[in-house]
Image (tube, rainbow, N blue to C red):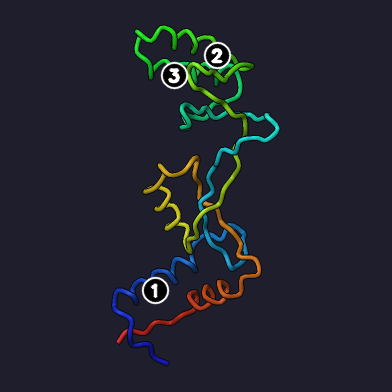
């Protein structure tokens, strides 16, 4: 069988991909395997508890802070930075914030406790491609890392990876 519609660039890509698939560290994970981006996403808690809280001002996320005195102090500093010195009423309201009393009508500040959860996004055939994506798009993610996943009971992915890992390309 001969495939005639591939360009020289396509053939080069397939050769390099085959080599990379066959030589990259499998991290003791069976085929079919693929890489994903694991990052953290804040999820507000329904029960009112959490190690963090998200501060919302005028309906917009202002930031996520640790749910302790240190986090409250960081929030205060961030809020004060956004007001000028002549906003004495707002500054007074900011300095009165405590862990027990974070919501403030004058500032239109509402805080919701919660925690971070791991989220897995995207799919890459190689570790290199995943890491390059993270490097170029880090600003979209919270604590991103490359994560090797197992394509459990995914016969199509298994077959494609098997073909890619053994394909022999003869150049004319």
Q: Position of residue 33 (x, y in %)?
A: 57, 64
Going from the N terminus, do you reach mark 3 or mark 1 first? Answer: 1
The residue that label 3 is drawn on is: 79
In the image, residue 167 sits, relative to residue 30, either above or below, namely: below
- The Cα–Cα distance between marks 3 and 1, rounded to whole angstroms, is 53 Å
Q: Secondary structure at mark 3?
A: helix
Q: Are marks 3 and 2 in contact (CB under 8 Å)?
A: no
Location of mark 2 (residue): 97
Front-lying residue, 172 or 10: 10
Q: Which residue is drawn at the image coordinates 58% and 57% (left, top)? A: 27
Q: On the picture, is 151 further left or further right than 11?
A: right
- In the picture, the quarter occupied by the N terminus is bottom left
Q: Nearer the viewer, mark 1 or mark 2?
A: 2
The answer to which of 100 and 31 lies nearer the viewer is 100
Residue position marked by numbered label 1 in the rendering: 14
**Label 2 neighbourhood size at 10 Å, few (<14), some (14-19), many (20+)?**
some
């Amino acid at each position: 069988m001969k495939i005639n519609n591939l360009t020289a660039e396509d053939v080069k890509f397939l050769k390099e991909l085959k080599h990379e698939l066959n030589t990259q560290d499998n991290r003791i994970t069976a085929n079919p395997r693929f890489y994903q981006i694991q990052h953290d996403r804040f999820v507000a808690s329904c029960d009112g508890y959490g190690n963090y809280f998200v501060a919302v001002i005028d309906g917009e996320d202002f930031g996520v802070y640790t749910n302790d005195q240190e986090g409250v102090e960081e929030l205060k500093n961030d809020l004060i930075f956004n007001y000028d010195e002549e906003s004495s009423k707002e500054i007074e309201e900011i300095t009165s914030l405590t862990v027990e009393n974070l919501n403030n009508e004058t500032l239109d500040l509402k805080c919701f406790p919660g925690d971070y959860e791991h989220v897995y996004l995207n799919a890459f055939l190689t570790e290199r491609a995943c890491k390059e994506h993270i490097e170029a798009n880090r600003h979209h993610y919270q604590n991103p890392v490359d994560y090797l996943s197992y394509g459990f009971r995914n016969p199509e992915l298994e077959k494609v990876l098997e073909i890619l890992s053994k394909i022999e390309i003869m150049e004319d």
